[in-house]
Amino acid sequence: MAMGRLKTRAGFAVASLFASAMALPAWAATLGMPTDGGIGLQPAGDQMRREAAQFHDLILLPIIVIISLFVLALLTWIVIRYNKKANPVPQKFTHNTKLEIVWTLAPVIILVFIAAFSFPLLFKYHDTPKADLTLKATGNQWYWSYEYPDQHIAEYVSNPLSEADSAKAGLPYKLAVNNPIVVPVGKTVKVLVAGADVLHAFFIPAFGVQVTAVPGRINQVWFQTEKTGRYYGECNELCGVDHSFMPIEVDVVDQPTFDAWVAKHATPAPAAAPAAPTTTAAAVPAATTATATPVKAGAPA
């Protein structure tokens, strides 16, 4: 009976792994939002996010696994080798110079190895390239507001859609908003992030973007879009009772669609003030010519 249960559980585990493997292409095809059953990071929406994911998957994750297995093996060996039954007389050593040197140098070497890959990535994130588009995002209690200064689009408020409206539009509830960010595909976007009241966080996983919105301070972050579509994020700073109602939606569209959106939402430039009428100066009567008196040499002028 027990053997049958074991076989059933093993079969279920194999079937689950097979189903997960078959679902991987579906996860890869989903951009910009969480996926049911996903076990890794969200698919990347730009090159920097892809490099960050590779750093996590190829550098950090193997190191974590190796260290965890090593510690597990070490604990197992200690439990078996030095338990009371196997070792009735306790060992009485206190120091081992060689061992102390090893466990001091090993973490340093590991950290230097990680730094060799992480620092270049951090510098890339820090050094914002020349932006094709600049927008300002302001965190408020509890909503986001956006402004496009170069396109003369005044600040507008973005709020989440209700559950009914989300279902009607076929969009994810608590992620979709009524007034999203709109950016053109293939462009470098610089985001100026500020807070109006308390700390908030501008966080878009698919772009690898996260920065704190601080009152009285302007922080900035950037991303470069690759594919059209909807990308979702949210405030992940505990900013108050309605913290969960601060989603972020970025609609990446082609250039003509973005131009049409800008034309629809831009504030018209104020009309130039009419020029002041030119007044004709009154004729000045000719002055009477006077005869100059000659000045003697040496006399004051």
Image: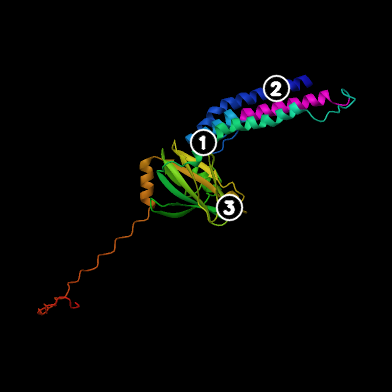
Q: Which of disc 1 and disc 2 is earlier in sequence?
A: 2
Q: Nearer the viewer, residue 140 or 107?
A: 107
Tell me if I can see residue 109 in this picture. Answer: yes
What residue does disc 2 label?
10
What residue does disc 3 label?
199
Q: Which residues fall within the magenta stretch? A: 61-84
Amino acid type of the residue that numbered disc 2 sits on in the rendered structure: Ala
Q: Are marks 3 and 1 in contact (CB under 8 Å)?
A: no
Q: CA distance from mark 2 to mark 3?
A: 48 Å
Report helix, strand or loop for mark 2: helix
In the rendered image, which quarter is residue 64 located in? Answer: top right
Count neighbours of disc 2 (C-alpha within 10 A) and say few if under 14, some if 14 to 19, many if 20 or more: few
Amino acid type of the residue that numbered disc 1 sits on in the rendered structure: Arg
What residue does disc 1 label?
49
Q: Percent from the top left, x then y, of residue 133? A: 41, 45
Amino acid type of the residue that numbered disc 3 sits on in the rendered structure: Leu
Image quarter of the C terminus = bottom left
Q: Which is closer to the viewer, label 2 or label 1?
A: 1
Q: Nearer the viewer, residue 170 or 43?
A: 43
Q: CA distance from mark 2 to mark 1?
A: 37 Å
Q: Nearer the viewer, residue 136 or 42?
A: 136
